[in-house]
């Protein structure tokens, strides 16, 4: 049995289902971003995920959100299409909103070096999800949503 298959079966059933959902979302988000653009895709996802907000995030929800973001990263690398950080972040943001949480979608640019490196991630109560600390610190959050339009095609 291959290593990837052993790792798949080692996951709890709930995580295998989440991973399949995330793998299925990636091509749909890619298509939506190409056809509708970022703003309309995000508006559609937000309309589909309206839930009453929870007053505070408990430790179990925070851990589950962190794991969801980790699974989105795996889905982005191992899914049917290679997925950028923007598509992964949109999927995580949408699924967390469906759970009644209030995640924030963040965009940043690392301007150190010859070419700017753009990145998208999700934060929950100010804590970045599934972001190695050093990589996250290199990116300064963008101040406007218009930056998102440029991250669509070049986000890592």
Image (spheres, rainbow, N blue to C red):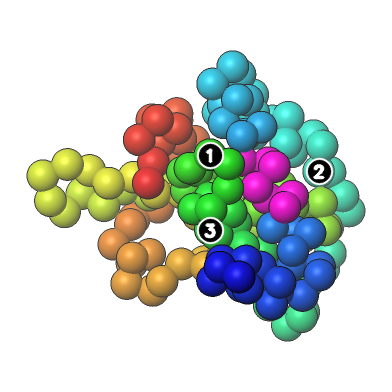
From the viewer's perspective, tell me whether residue 118 is left or right of residue 129: left
Q: Give the image location of residue 22, x and y in percent.
A: 68, 50
Q: Give the image location of residue 7, x and y in percent.
A: 61, 73
Per the image, the residue denoted by label 3 is: 73
From the viewer's perspective, tell me whether residue 82 is left or right of residue 103: left
Q: Which of 1 and 151 is in front in this view?
A: 1
- The secondary structure that dominates the magenta segment is helix
Query: How far apart are the alpha carbons under marks 1 and 2?
Result: 24 Å
Comes first in the chain, label 1 or label 2: 2
Q: Which of 138 and 56 is in front in this view?
A: 138
Residue 21 lies in the magenta stretch: yes
Q: Give the image location of residue 100, x and y in percent.
A: 83, 58
The answer to whether one can see residue 34 in this image is yes
Image quadrant containing the N terminus: bottom right
Residue placed farthest to the front in the image? 1
Residues in magenta?
A: 20-26
Disc 1, disc 3: CB below 8 Å?
Answer: no
SS at circle 3: helix
Q: In the drawing, what numbered circle is on residue 49?
A: 2
Asked if residue 28 is positioned above or below residue 1 in the image, the reply reads: above
Residue placed farthest to the left in the image? 114
Per the image, the residue denoted by label 1 is: 81
SS at circle 1: loop
């Amino acid at each position: 049995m291959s290593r990837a298959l052993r790792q798949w079966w080692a996951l709890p059933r709930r995580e295998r289902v989440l991973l399949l959902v995330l793998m299925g979302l990636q091509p749909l988000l890619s298509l939506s971003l190409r056809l509708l653009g970022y703003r309309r895709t995000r508006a559609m996802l937000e309309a589909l995920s309206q839930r009453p907000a929870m007053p505070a995030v408990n430790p179990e929800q925070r851990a589950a959100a962190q794991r969801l973001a980790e699974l989105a990263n795996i889905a982005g690398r191992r899914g049917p299409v290679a997925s950028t950080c923007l598509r992964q972040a949109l999927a995580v943001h949408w699924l967390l909103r469906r759970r009644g949480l209030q995640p924030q979608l963040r965009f940043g640019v690392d301007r150190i070096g010859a070419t700017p490196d753009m990145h998208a991630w999700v934060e929950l109560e100010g804590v970045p999800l599934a972001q190695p600390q050093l990589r996250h610190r290199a990116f300064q959050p963008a101040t406007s949503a218009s930056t998102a339009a440029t991250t669509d095609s070049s986000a890592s």
